[in-house]
Image (cartoon, grey):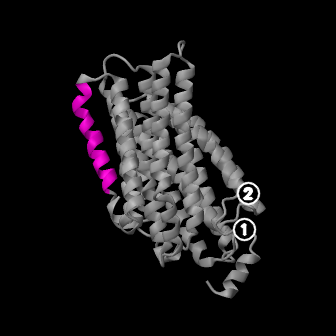
Amino acid sequence: MTASEDQRFIHSACLRVRGTASEGKVAFAELFFDLVFVLTIIQLSHSLAAHYSPLGLVEAALLMLAIWWVWIYTTWATNWLDPDKSPVRLLLFVLMFLGLLLSIAIPTAFGSGGLLFALTYVAMQVGRSAFTAHAMRRDWPENSRNFTRITVWTIFSALFWIAGALVEHEARLALWLVALAIEYASPALGFAVPGLGRSSVSDWQVSGEHMAERCALFVIICLGETILVTGRTVAGMELLDGFTIFLLLIAFVSTATMWWIYFRFGHGEAAHLIEHSPTPGRIARMAFTYAHIPIVAGIILSAVAEEFALAHPLGHLDAKTASAIIGGPVVFLLGNIWFKATIRGRSPLSHIVGVAALLGLSVIVPFVEPYQLFVAAGIVLFGVALWEFFSLKSTPADALTQA
């Protein structure tokens, strides 16, 4: 960016000032905006736990993908928009209120709350993109055209969101899957619009520090839900004995281990890579927009697994509980494999072996009780963290390829 372009940003009413210490800073307004997603993640995990079935998993996955898309698109926008400027701050407050309505609609999204969910989602997606295009029109016309293209795509997908809300059952699910497919495919297609051309990854000059910190905060929100689930489940028990405290410890250590796996190695590397990449938009799109999806999904599924295991630790281990206990860490590790392979160029061996070991636990399902499988899965996850830690600590020269 030239000096004259920098000067335009300094006088802009909405854009961050590039090349300053505050460029990658996460603003307090963004943290306030995130608060509504605490409720959103709670609603998602509760709905999944209450309707845990193949259909329930598909519906929960669809809702989670929609929620993530709202949040990550807002993060991309605030990578350029300055939340400390009044118009942008007002935008975040409006989005926050709409997000509250969206969260309220989650438990009944495939029932009576479908129209509320669809209208709120569409308002957030179209409104934010249109605002960003308008805010950039004078100071950054190239990126304004990018967000104009995004607005067109969100309007196109909105037709399917609203149409789905007007029908029921399988038809709603099918139409919403089409809407989601449109939105998730649009970045790969460069948001191509006749007459407006298409975007290129070279157009997306992002702050790696800001993007990494924003996604890290969302991961913390999800990890916080596992703590809330654990505490709420144990607090509702009549008897707090040594066995329950032991399971509480296992649940806490599992959550702390997921934090360790994500934050100890990977998060900081991604920020550094984006900052020094000639095409930061390409790295950010793959590492944060897409690779974080299974990371978030795995944590939410792990929260459901903790609720199942703590509520009924003894007796017969059914397929529902077993799939959650094994599936949560597996999906989480797969997301970390994707994330770390994107930034390192090679998948971490520790994570691959961890996934294989977790899947291998399925052979003992008929012979163990829920708490035993829960403990075994926690041990595997902790083993992965230890392997990665000692590999990267002992062989720094080969750290990024051998962990």
Disc 1 residue crowd, few under 14, some 14–19, many 20+, Cα 10 Å: many
Location of mark 2 (residue): 89
Location of mark 1 (residue): 14
Q: Magenta segment, which residues?
A: 349-366
Q: Is residue 171 visible?
A: no
Residue 362 is covered by the magenta coloring: yes
Looking at marks 2 and 1 on the same chain, the residue that comes earlier in the sequence is marked by 1
Q: Amino acid at mark 1?
A: Cys
Q: Is residue 127 above or below residue 46?
A: below
Magenta portion: prevailing SS class: helix
Residue 365 coordinates in the image, percent (x, y): 26, 28
> At numbered mark 1, what does the secondary structure look like: helix, strand or loop?
loop
Q: Is residue 278 above or below residue 206?
A: below
Q: Nearer the viewer, residue 248 or 133?
A: 248
Q: Amino acid at mark 2?
A: Arg
Residue 84 coordinates in the image, percent (x, y): 75, 61
